[in-house]
Image (spheres, rainbow, N blue to C red):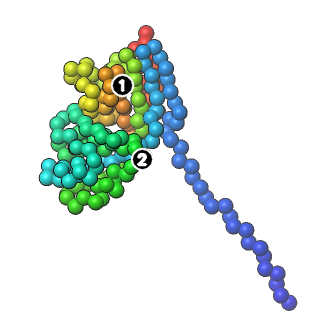
Amino acid sequence: MAKAAAKKTAAPAPSAERRAALAGQELFATGVKLAVMPPAERISLRAPDASMAALSKALGVTLPRKPKTSGAKAGRTALWLGPDEWLVIDEAAKDPLADCAKVTALHSAVDVSHRNVAISVTGPAAAATINSGCPQDLSLDAFPVGAASRTILGKVEIVLLRTAADAFRVECWRSFSDYVFTFLSEAAGDAAA
């Protein structure tokens, strides 16, 4: 007697859907707009002075050497966070980690793309909105266009970049993004009043 072979059906492959934190959230208030920015590639970069030239060449953007400064070129921005530390953000769908991997000079580069969320704060009341919970002096004299700083907003650490006279990029950890967006939303309402 031959046994009939049971027809096996493949079980559906398990899947996980990565959802962007705060996807699609925006807020408009008098004088300020908040918007979650599109995903970007990001690396946390550490390197000594001797490696900066090689890394700048590989990344296609000059790594800034002074506090509160940034450098940008072709959709890639490097923000100075400390004497040997930068946050590199790529909005041009290129991989800065792969670019750093080609460099033999001493450095450490870690992909933090999914750790961070960026929120744009724009409009004439943008600085007042951020200053409701951030001690950084955001006057144009003290914090000009291109200025970058690791600072705080309310109870959380952020990285702040001024992209225009009335525009900022707020980088925060994904786990704090709801708090940061809510904080900025309430502050925008106060700044508009």
Relative image position of residue 149 (x, y in whole percent): 26, 33
Relative image position of residue 72 (x, y in whole percent): 29, 38
The residue that appears at 52% across and 30% down in the rendered structure is 25
Category of crowding for the residue at label 1, using alpha-carbon neighbours closer than 10 angstroms: few (below 14), some (14–19), many (at least 20): many
Q: Dot 1 corresponds to which residue?
A: 167
| Residue 46 seen | no
The residue that appears at 33% across and 41% down in the rendered structure is 74
Q: Quadrant of residue 80?
A: top left
Q: Which quadrant, please, contains the C terminus?
A: top left
Q: Quadrant of residue 86?
A: top left
| Residue 4 seen | yes
Q: Is residue 22 left or right of residue 166?
A: right
- Element carrying mark 1: strand
Q: Is residue 72 left or right of residue 191?
A: left
Whether 112 is drawn above or below 118: the answer is: below
Q: CA distance from mark 1 to mark 2?
A: 22 Å
Whether 151 is drawn above or below 10: the answer is: above
Which numbered disc covers residue 93?
2
Whether 187 is drawn above or below 43: the answer is: above
Q: Is residue 115 left or right of residue 144?
A: right
